[in-house]
Amino acid sequence: MLVEDLKEDVKEFWNKSSCGEVYASGPSDVGYYEQHSHMRYQLEPYIRDFSRFADGRDKDVLEVGVGMGADHVEWARSYPRTLSGIDLTPRSVDHTLKRLSMYGLSSEVRIGDAEALPYRDNSFDIVYSWGVLHHSPNTSQAMREVHRVLRTGGTARIMIYHKYALTGYMLWCRYALLTGKIGMTLDEIYHRYLESPGTKAYTLEQTQAMLNGFSKANLVTQLSFGDLLQGAVGQRHSGALLRSAKLLWPRSLLKVLCRGHGLLLLIDATK
Ligand SMILES: C[S@@+](CC[C@H](N)C(=O)[O-])C[C@H]1O[C@@H](n2cnc3c(N)ncnc32)[C@H](O)[C@@H]1O
């Protein structure tokens, strides 16, 4: 498939439903967005720990892939000098602008592509991106763009997916083992069954290689709520098998034994 066709498919997928819409219901008023934020940070408390939104104070901050805008509101509340956000989809940009305006907050949010950021070199002190760059067909190019628009000494805080993760193993059991296609690789599994078409997941070594332009990079893996089968995991998976697994899942044990097998790969890098 051509890269441009794949990017269109990614856009179409996320434009049908932004990430996390499942966590809110009713008219899209303040209550709707409060529900979404509440569920998001309750299920994923590690987002706040990693993002450290308060660091945005007096900084030029860019978020790549704003989605429904929950984190973007948190960056806007941190009193940044300037705040910018992009997303591939009009749906996300609409959500985020609406959400900001409900709280009297502002940001320069627009439709844009992580692989061709519409900003000049050395424009930002912080570039933040949660769960986005692995959906873009050329993730290495998106990482280079993050590096380009950061000032020297600036910080990139990025979450991409980690390959050797419980989520991947579960999806492999479901879509490879149970269907007799045991030759299917984890890369194919992520590509076909995890969120938008063509999703990728990276090893620590592959991630380090993508970050070679940065002066330093700290990489940590984190078990996600999906790895622990908490909440409405993913937008594509449901059914009796999943319901039973959720009842039987040995969460406490997995937290101890599988700490290094989380889906989330947290990158804190300095240019
Ligand atoms: C899983 S959602 C994450 C959204 C948000 N960061 C969050 O945590 O809820 C992925 C988002 O990445 C966006 N996206 C995918 N590829 C992109 C690209 N090349 N450039 C900009 N945004 C992209 C999608 O439109 C979608 O809103």
Image: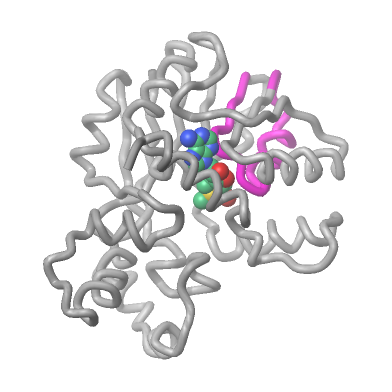
Residue 253 rendering spot, x and y as whole percentages: 30, 78
Residue drawn at (39%, 87%), measured in percent from left and top? Answer: 241
Residue drawn at (58%, 55%), measured in percent from left and top? Answer: 19
Which of the colour schemes (rainbow, by chain, secondary structure, one colour) is used?
A: one colour
Number of numbered discs overlaid on the protein picture: 0
- Please state, as top left, top right, bottom left or bottom right, where the C terminus lies in the image: top left
Q: Can residue 219 be seen in this view?
A: yes
Residue drawn at (43%, 67%), measured in percent from left and top? Answer: 226
Residue positioned most to the left: 183
Residue 158 rendering spot, x and y as whole percentages: 44, 37
Query: Residue 26 sits in which quadrant?
Result: bottom right
Left/right placement of residue 216 relative to residue 35 reads left
The one of 207 and 115 positioned closer to us in this rendering: 115
Relative vertical location of residue 128 with respect to residue 125 in this rendering, above or below: below
Relative vertical location of residue 141 with respect to residue 166 in this rendering, above or below: above
Left/right placement of residue 33 relative to residue 62 reads right
Residue drawn at (63%, 44%), measured in percent from left and top? Answer: 71
Residue 206 rendering spot, x and y as whole percentages: 21, 38
Q: Is residue 48 visible?
A: no
Residue 69 magenta-highlighted:
yes
Residue 186 magenta-highlighted:
no
| The magenta segment | 60-82
- Please state, as top left, top right, bottom left or bottom right, where the N terminus lies in the image: top left
The one of 59 and 137 positioned closer to us in this rendering: 137
Query: Residue 94 sits in which quadrant?
Result: top right
Residue 240 rendering spot, x and y as whole percentages: 44, 89
